[in-house]
Image (cartoon, rainbow, N blue to C red):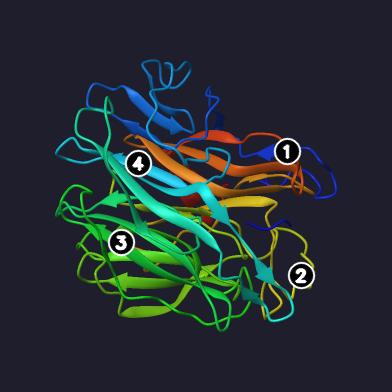
């Protein structure tokens, strides 16, 4: 949404990309999202429709059209999943009628702002699609994740633009009938004033006891977190998290092992300092927009504590941001940067990596003991 040891082997003033030695380049040419079917077939969706791969994403079938409005050039604007009953549910920002207007004098959104959230579903493996519907009107922006809970509920978070003062708020949508109908939670409002201020770009996952954890992007040098004890219907525990973060989103995922994994941009570089820009239309506070490094951390206690962050990739002078995480098979984690540029928003160079959970956990433990 906005510009701007063995692990540290080059200076930040160089333009070369650095990737952690334990990360492998993925042999794919797409950024996801992905779903693995029971027979191992890999699915993805783009503007042209749904595609299948039987070789792990190296090659893809021709697209089968789904609907208008999907923008595969905008990361974190759509997600899909296959439920335990076999329904494929897609939720997406509908760019067909997108309009954004901002009054810089009043710092308020125009009345015509529009980027609606829609959903559509398939009950025959993606061959045909039904129930295409608008589920949130007004202007909404990027979000991170679509999950099915252990009790079968479908949940995803929403970032929604409001006025007086102009800012974003967050809530969740949930469905108990395989995506046929949706209900809305209470809102989370952290205040703020600016077209990138407030509570923005949420990501969520289910905890081991069934509660839902949400991390929310802010301009306050850290993620804020919210807890729902009733499957995303109400968010009543809202507070700053212990995770420092720049004004940039993260992706939170629960792995098959039960661990949580988070990939995001921290407030400051691992070495050196980042000078905060003055962007009064974006935020009412001076914020970090640092996006040159992607970091990863794990939690084994439902997010109460986290491992020390590890930089997994660095693009000096550019950006690696808007991450997407996908567990291709237990322990194999795909990490993709939705925005990957050599210089701010110029010279795109994709970042698509694969890591193995246990290798990284072992590395983190050795580093903590002074062996890494």
Residue ID at (31%, 75%): 186
Residue ID at (66%, 75%): 283
Of callouts 4 and 2, which one flags the residue occurring earlier in the amino acid sequence?
4
Determine which residue is flagged by label 4.
80
Determine which residue is flagged by label 2.
276
Please identify the quadrant where the N terminus is shown: bottom right
Q: Secondary structure at mark 1?
A: loop
Left or right of 113? Residue 171 is: left
Image spot of residue 319 (x, y percent): 70, 48
The disc placed on residue 17 is 1
The disc placed on residue 173 is 3
Residue 207 visible in the shown view: no
Q: Gap between marks 4 and 3, in whole Å?
A: 14 Å
Q: Gap between marks 1 and 3, in whole Å?
A: 38 Å
Left or right of 221? Residue 234 is: left
Residue 155 in the image: above or below residue 357? below
């Amino acid at each position: 949404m906005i510009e701007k040891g063995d692990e540290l082997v080059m200076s930040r003033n160089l333009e070369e990309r650095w990737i952690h030695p334990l990360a492998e380049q993925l042999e794919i040419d797409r950024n996801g999202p992905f779903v693995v079917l029971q027979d191992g077939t890999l699915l993805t969706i783009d503007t042209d429709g749904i595609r299948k791969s039987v070789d792990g994403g190296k090659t893809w079938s021709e697209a089968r059209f789904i609907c208008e409005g999907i923008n595969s050039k905008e990361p974190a604007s759509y997600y899909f999943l296959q439920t335990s009953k076999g329904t494929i549910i897609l939720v997406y920002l509908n760019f067909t009628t997108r309009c954004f207007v901002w009054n810089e004098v009043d710092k308020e959104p125009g009345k015509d702002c529009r980027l609606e959230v829609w959903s559509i579903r398939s009950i025959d493996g993606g061959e045909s699609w039904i129930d295409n519907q608008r589920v949130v009107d007004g202007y909404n922006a990027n979000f991170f994740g679509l999950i099915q809970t252990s009790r079968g509920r479908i949940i995803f978070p929403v970032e929604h633009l409001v006025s007086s003062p102009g800012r974003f708020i967050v809530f969740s949508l949930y469905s108990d009938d395989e995506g046929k109908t949706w209900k809305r939670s209470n809102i989370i409002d952290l205040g703020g004033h600016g077209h990138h201020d407030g509570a923005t770009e949420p990501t969520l996952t289910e905890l081991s006891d069934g509660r839902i954890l949400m991390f929310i992007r802010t301009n306050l040098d850290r993620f804020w977190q919210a807890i729902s004890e009733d499957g995303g219907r109400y968010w009543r525990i809202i507070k700053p998290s212990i995770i420092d973060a720049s004004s940039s989103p993260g992706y939170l995922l629960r792995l098959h092992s039960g661990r949580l994994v988070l990939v995001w941009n921290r407030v400051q570089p691992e070495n050196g300092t980042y000078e905060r820009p003055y962007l009064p239309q974006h935020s009412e506070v001076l914020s970090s927009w640092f996006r040159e490094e992607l970091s990863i951390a794990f939690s084994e206690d439902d997010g109460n504590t986290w491992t020390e962050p590890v930089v997994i990739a660095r693009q000096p002078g550019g950006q690696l941001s808007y991450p997407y995480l996908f567990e291709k098979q237990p322990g194999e984690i795909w990490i993709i940067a939705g925005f990957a540029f050599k210089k701010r928003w110029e010279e795109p160079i994709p970042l698509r990596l694969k890591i193995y959970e246990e290798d990284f956990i072992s590395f983190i433990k050795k580093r903590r003991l002074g062996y890494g």
